[in-house]
Image (cartoon, helix red, strand yellow):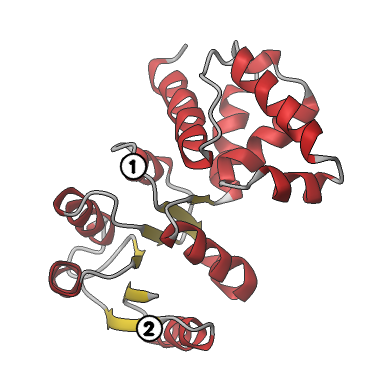
């Protein structure tokens, strides 16, 4: 699997390169600035891009904007962005085009090799890997609003894991329940949120996140 990596901190960039290579990934380029990232994404056509949100020269959201521009030029390009803090605006921008293969992780997660590599693989495969803290904040902001208030505590647990991009099997394993129970909870959740039921994990995650984000931005 071919990767373009963008991270301005040398030690972290070097560590990520070594980790990815240890798990069988091919690093096409490991860059530190926005212009270098833009060039690498345009010329190398990676299977997945792992991108720090803030890159030189602006140190704002240059990494994210380069990744979004690359996705516009190549729809569906898998992108996993890394951020120091929870920035819901960045998560919304990343998800806005509705295509799969996206992820948003806090940098703390990269120190858990298994979790980080799982996220890279899931995004590269067209799935979604959203940081639990992002999902938790979205849900907590909406916890008292309808129809979010209709969900039971267990349904909220399931929804958080669904929104992270977890499969029914993974959710069942984590909650120590059957896959059939998870499927029932998921069906109930989408019914309560007036969302169409779908077997496509990525589409259902994007639908849930879009709904939550819409409610937050409109104040409903």
Question: Residue 50 vs residue 65: left or right?
Answer: right
Above or below residue 142? Residue 178 is: below
Pick the quarter of the image with the N terminus: bottom left
- Camera-side residue of 218 and 37: 37
- Report helix, strand or loop for mark 2: strand
Residue at x-position 19% and y-position 54%: 74
Residue at x-position 60% and y-position 31%: 139
Q: Residues within 10 Å of mark 2 (few under 14, many from 20)?
A: some
Q: Position of residue 173 (x, y in %)?
A: 80, 50
Judging by the rendered image, the residue that carries numbered circle 1 is 99
Above or below residue 113? Residue 100 is: above
Give residue 27's quadrant in the image: bottom left
Q: Position of residue 165 (x, y in %)?
A: 56, 46
Q: Residues within 10 Å of mark 1 (few under 14, many from 20)?
A: some
Numbered badge on residue 126? none
Residue at x-position 28% and y-position 82%: 28
Q: How many marks?
A: 2
Question: Residue 23 vs residue 82: left or right?
Answer: right
- Report helix, strand or loop for mark 1: loop
Cα separation between marks 2 and 1: 24 Å
Question: Residue 86 vs residue 182: left or right?
Answer: left
Above or below residue 166? Residue 163 is: above
Which residue is situated farthest in the right direction here? 176
Q: Position of residue 88 (x, y in %)?
A: 43, 41
- Camera-side residue of 12 and 180: 180
Question: Residue 123 vs residue 45: left or right?
Answer: right
Looking at the image, tell me whether mark 2 or mark 1 is earlier in sequence order. 2
Residue 31 shows in this picture = yes
- Camera-side residue of 170 and 109: 170
Judging by the rendered image, the residue that carries numbered circle 2 is 26
State if disc 1 and disc 2 touch (CB < 8 Å): no
- Camera-side residue of 182 and 131: 182
């Amino acid at each position: 699997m071919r990767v373009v990596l963008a991270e301005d901190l040398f030690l972290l960039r070097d560590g990520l390169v070594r980790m990815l290579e240890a798990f069988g990934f091919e690093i096409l380029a490991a860059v530190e600035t926005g212009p270098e990232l833009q060039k690498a994404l345009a010329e190398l056509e990676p299977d997945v891009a792992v991108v720090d949100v803030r890159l030189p020269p602006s140190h704002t959201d240059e990494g994210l904007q380069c990744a979004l521009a690359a996705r516009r030029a190549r729809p569906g390009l898998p992108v996993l962005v890394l951020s120091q803090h929870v920035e819901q605006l960045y998560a919304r921008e990343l998800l806005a085009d509705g295509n799969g293969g996206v992820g948003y992780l806090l940098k703390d997660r990269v120190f858990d090799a298994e979790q980080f590599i799982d996220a890279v693989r899931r995004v590269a495969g067209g799935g979604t890997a959203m940081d639990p803290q992002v999902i938790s904040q979205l849900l907590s902001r909406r916890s008292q609003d309808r129809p979010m208030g209709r969900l039971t505590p267990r349904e909220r647990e399931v929804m958080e894991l669904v929104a992270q991009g977890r499969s029914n099997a993974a959710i069942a394993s984590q909650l120590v329940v059957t896959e059939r129970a998870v499927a029932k909870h998921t069906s109930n959740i989408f019914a309560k949120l007036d969302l169409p039921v779908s077997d496509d994990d990525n589409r259902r995650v994007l639908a849930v996140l879009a709904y939550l984000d819409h409610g937050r931005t409109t104040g409903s």
